[in-house]
Image: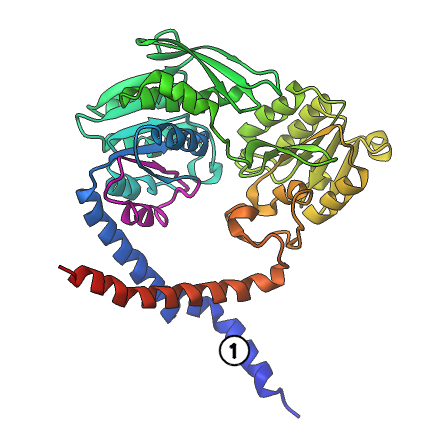
């Protein structure tokens, strides 16, 4: 007999999927909802009484935003957007800002040319903080001048009584001075920086100490970070908080209670197992040397460097993986590559034979190998782009990891997803159930909200 109806239906569904995704009711409703939220956010932004702080840069945005969020909470209510930094998320952040908020801290990033302008127009910050200009999203921007031109649009929208907090060591950041009439405050190692870094010292497990000299005095800041490269985020956030008039002694106390972002060079200690350096949010080529240097600077009897996908490089992909391998060989006893680029490791036959180098196609294979060969006294760097979720290698020591899909497509870490202990095949069903529950919850709340509004 001919092809069955269910099979014809499945074929029709598969072939029409691109059309339905582009023109169907669901994408249309999503676009209308996004447009409505954006218009509401513009209205709500006009009524905000909070001081609005926008933070951008090729790296250090999330850490700076998280530090500033913690510092400012010592002086009042803070509402923040951290890690999620696109126009898709910004309207929701503004629309959910409570009326008694004193500070709104928003991390804003760019992915393509033209992506900053609509966010800047919506956010309209009182203060713009720019950390540095690098070559993240190389395929879209190609050079630092283009990145600077795009990120500088956040500085352009500052009011005349606003403030730009700029990295004095980065000429591409400092060029943004010409694009605003707002007051300029600088930070960095440069002699003429308003907040000048005098020293950045770390000898893990002792805390990172950053010494900053400014008009108000010289301050030694103790932080929980394992690398001296965190001076940038520490200094940028300290300068911003000081310019907002916060008491420096209170800020030093707040730094002492700071909890770092766990997946941005955070330290994960396991019971009777390895200690991990978790740097699994992103891996632009420029960031690889600093991450490996962090591993090299910390003393441990045995070290491993686990390298996943590397992004944002020019030319042949062999070069970034070769450099990552060579740096890892100097810093670690064993180098492990994970993912589709394991063939790019320039390991010798001897290094492959004696186990100095290992390559695994999937994150699960690497996690299983590390479990089998782990030492309680070892230190392991996990460095890679988020697409392969290398954080699961460390989380396998603290959670019952059951989701091992190599490329799930989600741009959030496994703890934000919340389903790391659930097989990937069950995620879609769970999300549908969660959406239905949220929809019914909103429906139940609407009559209650209306009744509250009608009360005298």
> Does the magenta stretch mainly form a helix, a strand or a loop?
loop
> Where's residue 304, x and y in %?
72, 30
Relative height, residue 37 to residue 132 (above, below): below
User: Above or below — where is 66 with respect to 202?
Assistant: below
Residue at screen point 60% across, 81% down:
7
Residue 383 at x, y = what percent? 61, 35
* Residue 167 visible at all: no
- Name which residue lies at 30% across and 21% down: 246
SS of the residue at dot 1?
Answer: helix
Which corner quadrant holds the C terminus?
bottom left
Residue 254, can we see it?
yes
Percent across and percent down for residue 119 are 30, 42
In the foreground, 199 or 442: 442
Using the rendered view, name the quadrant where residue 436 is placed: bottom left
Residue 241 lies in magenta, yes or no? no
Residue 78, placed above or below residue 178: below
Q: Does the magenta stretch include residue 107?
A: yes
> Which residue is farthest bottom?
1
The location of residue 38, given as percent across then percent down, is: 27, 52
User: What is the magenta range?
Assistant: 83-111
Number of callouts in the render?
1
Residue annotated with mark 1 = 12
Q: Which of the 4 image quarters holds residue 110?
A: top left
418 w.r.t. 342: above or below: below
């Amino acid at each position: 007999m001919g092809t069955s109806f269910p099979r014809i239906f499945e074929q029709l569904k598969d072939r029409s999927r691109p059309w339905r995704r582009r023109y169907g009711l669901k994408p249309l409703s999503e676009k209308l909802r996004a447009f409505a939220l954006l218009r509401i956010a513009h209205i709500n932004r006009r009524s905000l009484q909070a001081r609005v702080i926008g933070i951008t840069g090729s790296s250090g945005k999330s850490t700076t935003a998280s530090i500033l969020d913690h510092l400012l909470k010592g002086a009042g209510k803070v509402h923040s957007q951290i890690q999620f930094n696109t126009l898709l998320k910004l309207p929701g952040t503004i629309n959910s800002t409570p009326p008694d908020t004193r500070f709104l801290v928003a991390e804003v990033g760019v992915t393509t040319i033209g992506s900053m302008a609509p966010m800047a127009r919506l956010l309209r910050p009182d203060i713009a903080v720019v950390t540095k200009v690098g070559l993240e999203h190389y395929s879209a921007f190609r050079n630092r001048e283009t990145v600077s031109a795009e990120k500088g649009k956040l500085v352009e929208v500052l009011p005349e009584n606003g403030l730009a907090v700029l990295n004095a060591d980065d000429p591409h950041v400092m060029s943004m001075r010409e694009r605003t009439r707002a007051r300029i405050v600088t930070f960095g190692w440069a002699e003429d920086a308003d907040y000048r870094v005098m020293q950045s010292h770390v000898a893990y497990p002792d805390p990172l100490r950053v010494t900053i000299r400014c008009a108000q005095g010289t301050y030694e800041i103790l932080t929980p970070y394992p690398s001296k490269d965190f001076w940038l985020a520490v200094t940028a956030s300290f300068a911003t908080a000081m310019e907002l008039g916060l008491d420096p002694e209170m800020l030093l106390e707040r730094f002492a209670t700071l909890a770092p972002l766990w997946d941005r060079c955070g330290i994960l200690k396991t019971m009777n197992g390895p200690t991990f350096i978790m740097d699994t949010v992103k891996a632009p080529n420029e960031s690889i040397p600093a991450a490996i240097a962090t591993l090299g600077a910390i003393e441990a009897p045995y070290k491993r460097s686990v390298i996943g996908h590397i992004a944002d490089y020019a030319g042949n992909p062999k070069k970034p993986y070769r450099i990552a391998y060579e740096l890892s060989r100097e810093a670690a006893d064993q180098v492990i590559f994970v993912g589709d680029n394991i063939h790019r490791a320039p390991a010798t036959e001897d290094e492959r034979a004696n186990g100095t180098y290992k390559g695994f196609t999937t994150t699960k294979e690497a996690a299983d190998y590390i479990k089998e060969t782990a030492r309680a006294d070892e230190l392991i760097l996990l460095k890679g782009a988020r697409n392969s979720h290398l954080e699961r290698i460390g989380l396998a020591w603290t959670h019952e990891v059951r989701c091992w899909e190599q490329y799930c497509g989600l741009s959030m870490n496994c703890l934000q997803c919340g389903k790391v202990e659930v097989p990937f095949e069950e995620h879609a069903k769970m999300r549908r159930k969660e959406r239905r529950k949220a929809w019914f919850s909103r429906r139940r709340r609407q009559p209650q909200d209306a009744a509250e509004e009608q009360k005298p």
